[in-house]
Amino acid sequence: MNHNIYLYILVMALTTYLVRMLPLVLTKKEITNVYIRSFLYYVPYACLAAMTVPAIFTATSSIWSGAAGFLVALIAAFRERKLLTVALLACAAVFLTERLMELIPYIMDKL
Amino acid sequence: MNRKAEFKQGMKDGIPIALGYLAVSFTFGMMAVSGGISIGESVLISLTNVTSAGQFAGLDIIAASGTYIEMILTQFIINLRYSLMAFSMSQKLSREESFAHRFLVSFGLTDEIFGISAAREGKVSAWYNYGAMCVAIPGWVLGTLIGAISGNMLPEFIVSALSVAIYGMFMAIIIPPSKKDKAVLIVVIASMIISTLFSVIPVLNTISPGFVIIITTVLVAGIMAWIHPIDILDIKEAADHES
């Protein structure tokens, strides 16, 4: 079968857009039902937590640097640092952990 | 806040998102070109889709010359979590602004932009989302372009470090409210445990990550709303705390 790349892209983009657009446009009224309101109040927290763990542990080149990023982000977020600060501190933790891990074989050699 | 201030704040909050996107879309660009897709086409995919998991899955289908139905079903399942976010956003978006804004806001409703909008105090203005989109989407597209042009412009250690930026941001959004609201804390911990179980338990770990997020979210938010419903006053109070 011969497929057109632009048709693939169109199908992909259209499906993705409709999935995002329809609920936002079709739910016009303010929801008064307490159960649904409570559900929607919890959705972002459940969703973002599920996206972060376990993904953060496998996003970097090693599970240890991912864990370091997680720990540092957890402490920084707990201290209510700004979004960018938490993000950059997590990046720095990953970077430093990976550099330290490169040093371990050399230290082992010396011992 | 007026439109301009909302837009500016959105741009500011969009910076860490753009940084995180650079790393992810860079990888996407590299993989797209190595899968036989041209530089222009990979950039077009990023510009029209603005979603990570969906685009990576799309690449596989294009490379395998899959059917269009397969493409629709895969995108639908992987991206179904956006419907949940869109439903949540439908309540969060300011009603003072024109209804037409919803069509534009939904184009840029990514995990990260949804995250920062959800963290706003009270209702959120469409202009806040536009500000974030103006910074985040160019980051997404630019990363794809750089990745597609050269597979080794960014050294591997930088890509690795940048890839946690997005998760750091997510945590900056969910941890502070967890300190104040025990129900939110339980939701966060339970979600982390359940999604981890899905990735380690045999059979369950074959379910796509996009679907795991939907199952986890519906399960945890659904049970919590049932055992610990909050009335409108509580939500307002919690929103005040978030600031």
Image: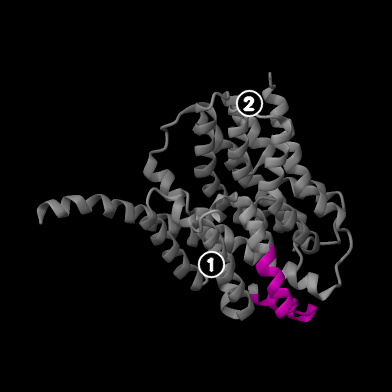
Q: Over which residues does the magenta segment extend?
A: B218-241
> Which residue is painted at 74% across and 76% down in the image?
B226
Q: Mostly what secondary structure, the magenta segment? A: helix
Q: In which quarter of the image is the C terminus of chain A?
A: bottom left
Q: Percent position (x, y) of residue B27? A: 50, 38
Q: Look at the image and say whether residue A36 sits in the magenta stretch.
A: no
> Which residue is painted at 22% across and 54% down in the image?
A104
In the image, taking residue A40 as reference, residue A103 lies left or right, namely left
Dot label at residue B65 = 2
Name which residue type carries label 2. Ser
Name which residue type carries label 1. Ile
Dot label at residue B229 = none
Identify the element where label 1 is drawn: helix
Q: Percent position (x, y) of residue B141? A: 60, 37
Which chain is mark 1 on? B
Count of labels shown? 2
| Separation of residues labelled 1 and 2 (CA atoms) | 37 Å
The residue that label 1 is drawn on is: B193
Q: To which quarter of the image does residue A64 belong?
A: bottom left
Outermost left residue:
A111
Mark 1 and mark 2 lie on one chain; the one further toward the N terminus is: 2
Do we see residue B7 in this rendering? yes
Q: Quadrant of the N terminus of chain A?
A: top right
